[in-house]
């Protein structure tokens, strides 16, 4: 998508939006999602890394995305979500300096996109995160989750604009890919322990949300007029594999085999390698 989150959080609940909402305007879709969304659901989406810790995983900074400079707008939007997951991952294990670094990187991407005047920047990077950049020693996992969850009301306006949906769609995509990668690698390194295997299912809400978001974007006439052919094709490609993976996890009901996990982990590695455009 050359032109979603954006901070990705509103999209979590698009999985619950009725099918008829897909034919409504962007404003109507946005309003409907706000009515359905709850802080509890958003919190559950962001708790995958905490469930990794509780299942016995260890923190490995090498699994987070290394520092990178970007000059591509789509990649910047995607990395808002990548850094959001990395920050939550580090926070779950109490790695405060890393949390601050990832939050700063996320904020830097928002600033580089020059979103002011087009979308509500506070919706993309909650103002409550600013004190965490100033006082990283006081940051904990619950603070970060609360900052995003309490930011829910700001997403109504963000989702009304095609440019806002681009931020939302791309950032949630980055969140999902980074989440699948870190989770998959952590589980493989733990020897595919049954308790760890179930953690991957915690990505289902994000996968379902992103699939439904792309479906809504594809069917919305206002967004279609904004989206060129290449962007539309990329939306379709993304939604295809995301929906397939979400359906597979739902069918397995938490009973993934080692081979299935290996396939997901390998796929996540490949998708992660495509987040940054080749020169």
Image: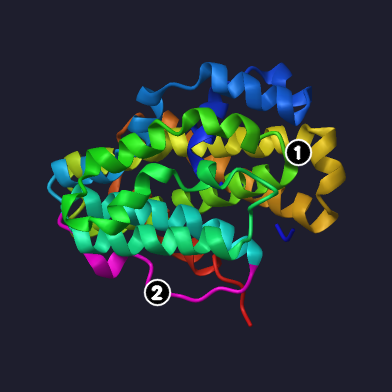
Secondary structure state at the residue bearing disc 1: helix
Q: Residue at x 50, y 60 (%)?
A: 79
- Tag 1 or tag 2, which sits nearer the N-term? 2
**Residue 173 appears at what percent x and percent y?**
53, 50
When the figure is inspected, residue 213 is found, relative to residue 238, above or below; the finding is above
Residue under pointer 1: 218
Q: What secondary structure characterizes most of the magenta part?
A: loop
Instruction: Give the quadrant of residue 178.
Output: bottom left
Residue under pointer 2: 67
Instruction: Give the quadrant of residue 160.
Output: top right
The one of 73 and 175 positioned closer to us in this rendering: 73
When the figure is inspected, residue 68 is found, relative to residue 23, above or below; the finding is below
The one of 19 and 258 positioned closer to us in this rendering: 19
Q: Residue furthest bottom?
A: 279
- Does any portion of residue 35 appear in the rendered image? yes
**Residue 119 appears at what percent x and percent y?**
65, 45
Is residue 68 inside the magenta stretch?
yes
């Amino acid at each position: 998508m050359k032109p979603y989150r954006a901070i990705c959080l509103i999209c979590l609940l698009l999985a619950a939006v009725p099918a008829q909402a897909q034919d409504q305007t962007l404003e109507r879709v946005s309003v409907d999602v706000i009515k359905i969304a709850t802080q509890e659901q958003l919190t559950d989406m962001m708790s995958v890394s905490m469930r990794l810790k509780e299942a016995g995983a260890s923190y490995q900074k090498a699994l987070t995305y290394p520092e990178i400079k970007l000059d591509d707008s789509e990649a910047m939007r995607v990395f808002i979500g990548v850094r959001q997951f990395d920050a939550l991952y580090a926070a779950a294990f109490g790695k405060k300096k890393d949390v601050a670094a990832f939050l700063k990187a996320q904020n830097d991407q928002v600033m580089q996109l020059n979103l002011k005047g087009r979308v509500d920047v506070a919706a993309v990077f909650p103002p409550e995160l600013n004190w965490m950049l100033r006082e990283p020693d006081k940051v904990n996992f619950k603070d970060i989750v609360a900052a995003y969850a309490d930011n829910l009301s700001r997403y109504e306006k963000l989702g009304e604009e095609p440019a806002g949906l681009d931020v939302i769609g791309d950032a949630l995509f980055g969140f999902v890919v980074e989440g699948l990668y870190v989770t998959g690698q952590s589980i493989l390194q733990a020897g595919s322990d049954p308790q760890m295997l179930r953690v991957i299912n915690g990505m289902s809400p994000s996968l379902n949300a992103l699939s439904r978001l792309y479906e809504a974007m594809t069917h919305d006439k206002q967004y279609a007029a904004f989206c060129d052919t290449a962007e539309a094709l990329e939306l379709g490609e993304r939604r295809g594999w995301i929906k397939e993976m979400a359906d597979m996890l739902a069918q397995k009901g938490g009973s993934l085999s080692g081979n299935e996990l290996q396939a997901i982990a390998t796929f996540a590695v490949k998708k992660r390698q495509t987040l940054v455009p080749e020169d």
